[in-house]
Image: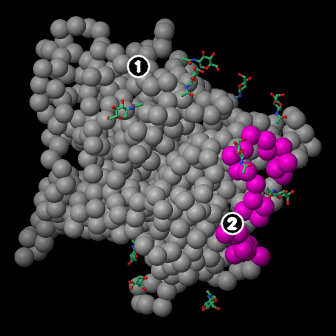
Amino acid sequence: MVNLMERGVLLVLVACILPAILVECRVRHYKFNVVMKNHTRQCSTKSIVTVNGKFPGPTIVAREDDTVLVKVVNHVKYNLTIHWHGIRQIRTGWSDGPAYIAQCPIQPGQTYTYNFTVTGQRGTLFYHAHILWLRATVHGAIVILPKLGVPYPFPKPDKENIIVLGEWWKSDVEAVINEALKSGLAPNVSDAHTINGYTRPVKNCNSKEMFNIHVKPGKRYMLRIINAALNEELFFKIADHKLTVVEVDATYVKPFKTDTIVISPGQTTNVILEANNKAMGKYLVVVSPFMDAPVPVDNATGFATLRYPAFRHKTLSATLTAPPPINATAVADNFTNALRSLNTKEFPAKVPQKVDHSLFFTVGLGVNPCKTCVNGSRIVADINNITFVMPDISILQAHYYNISGVFTDDFPAKPPTPFNFTGNNQVTNVGTTKGTKVYRLPYNATVQLVLQDTAIIAPENHPFHLHGFNFFVVGKGVGNFNPKNDPKKFNLVDPVERNTIGVPSGGWAAIRFRADNPGVWFFHCHLEIHTTWGLKMAFLVDDGKGPSESLLPPPNDFPKC
Ligand SMILES: *[C@@H]1O[C@H](CO)[C@@H](O)[C@H](O)[C@H]1NC(C)=O
Ligand SMILES: *[C@@H]1O[C@H](CO)[C@@H](O)[C@H](O)[C@H]1NC(C)=O
Ligand SMILES: *[C@@H]1O[C@H](CO)[C@@H](O)[C@H](O)[C@H]1NC(C)=O
Ligand SMILES: *[C@@H]1O[C@H](CO)[C@@H](O)[C@H](O)[C@H]1NC(C)=O
Ligand SMILES: *[C@@H]1O[C@H](CO)[C@@H](O)[C@H](O)[C@H]1NC(C)=O
Ligand SMILES: *[C@@H]1O[C@H](CO)[C@@H](O)[C@H](O)[C@H]1NC(C)=O
Ligand SMILES: *[C@@H]1O[C@H](CO)[C@@H](O)[C@H](O)[C@H]1NC(C)=O
Ligand SMILES: *[C@@H]1O[C@H](CO)[C@@H](O)[C@H](O)[C@H]1NC(C)=O
Ligand SMILES: *[C@@H]1O[C@H](CO)[C@@H](O)[C@H](O)[C@H]1NC(C)=O
Ligand SMILES: *[C@@H]1O[C@H](CO)[C@@H](O)[C@H](O)[C@H]1NC(C)=O
Ligand SMILES: *[C@@H]1O[C@H](CO)[C@@H](O)[C@H](O)[C@H]1NC(C)=O
Ligand SMILES: *[C@@H]1O[C@H](CO)[C@@H](O)[C@H](O)[C@H]1NC(C)=O
Ligand SMILES: [Cu+2]
């Protein structure tokens, strides 16, 4: 009897390590030692912050309905938090991660165990540090497998590959952002784009600068593509190969074929790649920035190769492909316009049809005075003219423990002073208001939120990310949102469901969600520099009345400020 039990325990352990084995494993344990690691890229070595010495960090694998426990030990000199990007964290906001919104930091030498259950989600997400600019190197994939016995709603791939896209600075990233905050100007752009930590071959550098995706002819692959870059939306393309998009942000979409995908920081995209039966040799994989505004970006293309087995290497040179031009708005629109929720009986699109809270947020940049800055002013960012100021303790704690003086719940539902948001002459609109304000929602309220880009300084595509929820992208357009005509064109049937949406440059996007998750939920631009400049706010969702409609109590090891 004892023997059998021991064997049972052993089986469960094996199953936890090898998720493919058909044994249920309800709790997944991970240990993240956050440590410094010397890393060489592009002929320069620097010390970076990593999870377990890896860049990108280790992959978390869980099955829908599993509980995930991640013990994070902070061995570095920085304050640290980790966010499980896209995980809904139903009633477990304490494990969401954004510093001073959901938690106080895990200070040097401290430990905190994130504890969350994956509910109603399957697909690819990722985790990343959510304090300072540490997420540049502290990030990794989260793979959520469907429930046991539930197939993918598309032909089963023979193999799955994770592709994490990132940005590499030769300098220390904290030095880059600190220099910018001191001067009040924009930070230096990155020096290279990375694909699973690799950049591209560089003259006179060692050869280990390029990542290879190995494929066999006739096999089907699922690429789980993650944009973990800080400040750049990216195009991703493989020479001579079409990609079938099947999922974004861990929700299934109606499959469609494309040769280029566009992916914003904070977004994930699963594509199916059929390795061509007749293909030989190698094919170039390119990653390049998408920027359709006068804003400087790292314009160096990142390269990887798709490689067929060596015996097929009839030629040594790769089949090439050119990335789209940096300002290829039409290519990006083509891609985003093709995204639709799968919306089947098994995976319905539960789009709120009725709106309780109708919000209109202007999102963009601003200029505030700064005596010590280079120009006597600093670039800031704001939502409805509010540049968000981080509090000293987390808003979630202040809310739960009724601590006053930390935040106010008077975030405006619309801009205080309407203006021609995308007009050319914005000189009169300099100056923003600072504040730590949240927008309060009753449990289960439905929200429609129109995000309107502004042209202050420059229009720009802002990838907005909502914590704690998925939302439906019911509409988008260029210029100023027209409250009379545009809603008539909304898709309330099968709009794409996701957690991060690129608000078009000089345009708007409309999203809808149901506030069925009590807690405090960060909402921010996922371009790290814009978040730093204040392009952020939070929603506070009150507890409901039912037994499972309230925020759970905080864990015992919850970090203190
Ligand atoms: C990184 O390299 C420097 C210089 O060689 C060395 O002093 C340091 O101990 C190394 N750090 C780690 C974490 O290996
Ligand atoms: C994780 O949280 C759940 C409640 O959501 C709790 O029952 C469980 O004991 C926690 N696990 C650990 C190891 O703290
Ligand atoms: C930013 O770029 C400037 C100009 O190339 C350079 O002088 C400066 O050292 C860079 N800053 C950092 C932190 O790398
Ligand atoms: C990238 O930008 C730099 C600086 O703006 C410019 O000199 C260079 O020509 C650009 N390179 C490409 C490939 O567009
Ligand atoms: C993209 O930029 C190029 C070079 O500046 C310019 O010639 C072209 O018109 C631009 N295309 C679009 C669609 O704006
Ligand atoms: C947009 O997609 C259509 C259909 O796939 C294609 O014919 C067209 O060339 C694409 N346009 C751009 C700009 O990529
Ligand atoms: C600030 O200074 C920089 C460099 O001196 C200059 O290029 C830029 O135009 C100035 N920006 C503003 C808003 O004054
Ligand atoms: C906070 O205030 C609410 C409403 O007044 C009360 O129900 C709750 O028990 C208080 N919480 C704490 C931790 O004091
Ligand atoms: C807003 O600005 C745009 C671009 O400058 C202009 O075409 C448009 O007429 C303006 N709209 C209004 C209502 O002033
Ligand atoms: C934003 O707030 C500042 C400071 O209160 C004010 O000077 C400015 O006019 C406001 N701008 C807009 C567009 O509301
Ligand atoms: C939330 O609202 C919807 C529709 O307004 C209703 O059908 C549902 O029962 C509500 N759920 C809860 C838990 O109150
Ligand atoms: C780390 O966080 C604590 C708690 O918020 C704070 O008191 C401390 O100043 C932070 N340390 C640094 C180096 O920012
Ligand atoms: Cu932004």
138 above or below 495? above
Q: Quadrant of residue 390?
A: bottom right
Residue tagged 2: 414
Graded by Cα atoms within 10 Å as few (under 14), some (14 to 19) or many (20 or more), the crowding at tag 2 reads some
Residue at 63% over, 63% down: 360
Q: Secondary structure at mark 2?
A: loop
Type of amino acid under label 1: Ala
In screen coordinates, is 315 left or right of 524?
left
85 above or below 469? above
* Residue 421 part of the magenta segment: yes
Residue tagged 1: 322
User: Which stretch appears magenta?
Assistant: 405-431
Quadrant of ligand 9: it is top right
Type of amino acid under label 2: Lys
311 above or below 447? above
Q: Is residue 193 visible?
A: no
Disc 1 + disc 2, Cβ < 8 Å: no
Q: Secondary structure at mark 1?
A: loop
Gap between marks 1 and 2, in whole Å?
43 Å
- Where does the image place residue 296, in percent across and percent down from the top left? 65, 29
